[in-house]
Image (tube, coloured by chain):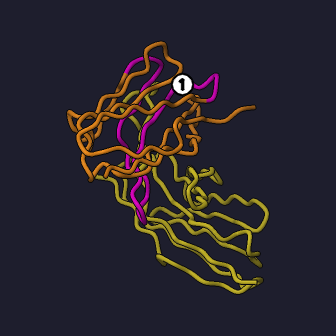
Amino acid sequence: EDQVTQSPEALRLQEGESSSLNCSYTVSGLRGLFWYRQDPGKGPEFLFTLYSAGEEKEKERLKATLTKKESFLHITAPKPEDSATYLCAVQERPQGETSGSRLTFGEGTQLTVNP
Amino acid sequence: DTGVSQNPRHKITKRGQNVTFRCDPISEHNRLYWYRQTLGQGPEFLTYFQNEAQLEKSRLLSDRFSAERPKGSFSTLEIQRTEQGDSAMYLCASSLGQTGAWETQYFGPGTRLLVL
């Protein structure tokens, strides 16, 4: 069974203080690893997909990296508007090439950036 | 470009009542997923459709839950005889699934259910 563990559960940063969030996973055949941002009372907002070890993607102050066992979301010089819960999810390779596949989520890291 | 929409956004009901939620996916998306999220947890998969066919259901989906996607467009999720443990945010996601192509699921705003 796929498993995703995120750490830390909560993280408080000062504005401009860079840090990283961790996502450890076990999956039998990774199709993709996804990062989402979720604001209170809203649905998850897609950030990145990573497909193979060594891959990196960047968007503004966020950079996601992937190894065979974990992914990191690096936040450089965060701003208060980056405060949110960041969710990591894995998607297993489906049995059929034309099939979809569920996402298995971690519990998220709640990030607070103080001004 | 409109995203995934869900209605209602909030629902309060009494234990034992039936409730139905609706999800309208992004227009050209052929896959539609339902997830449930409780406070402090990540979303958990419930079921998924490819066009009108329901292809997978989680063990979490008891026989009180039923989902449909009659014409391969919008979907409904019905919960019969609601219990307090059903209180959660119900999320819908859609994706464009193509052979050999990567798939990204885009989520709607969710329906928050409170069972009293």
What color does chain A have in the rendering? yellow
Q: Position of residue A41 (x, y in %)?
A: 56, 56
Examine the rendered structure and indicate whether residue B92 appears above or below residue A42: above
User: In the figure, is residue A33 to the left or right of B77?
Assistant: right
Determine which quarter of the picture holds residue A113: bottom right
Q: Amino acid at mark 1?
A: Thr
User: In the figure, is residue A76 to the left or right of A9?
Assistant: right
Determine which quarter of the picture holds residue B49: top left
Find out whether residue B44 is within the magenta segment.
yes
Examine the rendered structure and indicate whether residue B115 appears above or below residue B76: below
Q: Chain of mark 1?
A: B
Residue at position x 48%, y 19% in the image: B51
Residue lying at the far top of the rendered structure: B71
Stretch of the chain drawn in magenta: B26-53
Residue A109 or residue A62, whichever sits in front? A109
Q: Circle 1: is it few (<14), some (14-19), or many (20+) Cα within 10 Å?
A: few
User: In the figure, is residue B27 to the left or right of B6?
Assistant: right
In the rendered view of the protein, which quadrant contains the C terminus of chain A?
bottom right
For mark 1, give the secondary structure: loop
Residue A59 or residue A71, whichever sits in front? A59
Q: Dot 1 corresponds to which residue?
A: B99
Q: Position of residue B113 (x, y in %)?
A: 41, 47
Find out whether residue B65 is within the magenta segment.
no
What color does chain B have in the rendering? orange
Residue at position x 43%, y 61% in the image: A106
Residue at position x 49%, y 38% in the image: B92
